[in-house]
Image (cartoon, rainbow, N blue to C red):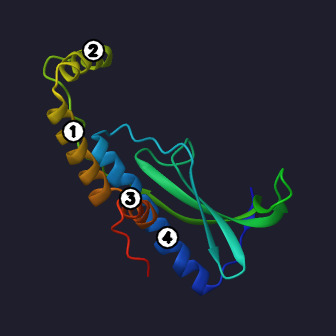
């Protein structure tokens, strides 16, 4: 078992908010995808606070209560990557257990006829293959708009705006 990582109140506040945002984004993706099979094997996110880099892990495994996820924070040590560039590596000697939480996802959508995934995939392929170009384009517009409005982070949204020349650099 790793020793407890020492965090300042400032770092703890930022890490807690960051972890909450990461979990919210993960749950939002689960709702958009429409699944309760959202298994967080080991979601990792890095965040730098002042001169310290942290590796945040959100996961569910045998150590968590059924239906719960946990969040653990590790500090990262500076290192050089394979190209000699400055980088970070996770130091698992010490960690901070931020929280364990019960997660609620939307009820799983089940087909009344209980078709297999392969049958559904084949049916979708046949139907989409028969769509005209206008229907395909409208479907792409609708799905992209929904993704960028509901799921995408600010950097991804900025990339979209740059590609579309609506970007107003700040």
Q: Which residue is mark 4?
A: 18
Mark 2 Cα within 10 Å, few/some/many (few <14, many 20+)?
few
Can you say whether 146 is above or below 79 in the image?
above
Where does the image place residue 152, in percent across and percent down from the top left? Answer: 37, 58
Q: Are marks 3 and 1 in contact (CB under 8 Å)?
A: no
> What's the distance in space between the residues labelled 4 and 3, CA to CA?
23 Å
18 or 143, which is in the foreground? 143
Q: Earlier in the sequence, mark 2 or mark 4?
A: 4
Q: Secondary structure at mark 1?
A: helix
What residue is rendered at 46% in x and 65% in y? Answer: 155
Mark 4 Cα within 10 Å, few/some/many (few <14, many 20+)?
some
Residue placed farthest to the front in the image? 165
Q: Quadrant of the C terminus?
A: bottom left
Viewer-side label of 2, 4: 2
Q: Secondary structure at mark 4?
A: helix
Q: Which residue is mark 3?
A: 160
Viewer-side label of 2, 3: 3
């Amino acid at each position: 078992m790793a020793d407890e990582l020492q965090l300042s109140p400032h770092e703890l506040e930022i890490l807690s908010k960051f972890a909450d945002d990461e979990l919210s984004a993960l749950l939002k993706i689960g709702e958009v995808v429409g699944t309760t099979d959202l298994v967080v094997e080991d979601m990792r996110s890095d965040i730098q606070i002042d001169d310290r880099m942290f590796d945040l892990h959100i996961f569910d495994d045998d150590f968590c209560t059924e239906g719960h996820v946990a969040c653990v924070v590790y500090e990262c040590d500076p290192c050089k990557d394979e190209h000699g560039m400055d980088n970070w590596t996770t130091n698992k000697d010490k960690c901070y257990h931020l929280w364990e939480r019960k997660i609620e996802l939307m009820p799983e959508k089940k087909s009344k006829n209980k078709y297999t995934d392969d049958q559904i995939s084949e049916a979708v392929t046949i139907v989409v293959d028969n769509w005209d170009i206008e229907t395909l384009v409208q479907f792409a517009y609708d799905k992209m708009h929904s993704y960028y409005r509901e799921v995408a982070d600010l950097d991804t949204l900025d990339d979209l705006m740059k590609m579309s020349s609506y970007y107003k650099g700040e």
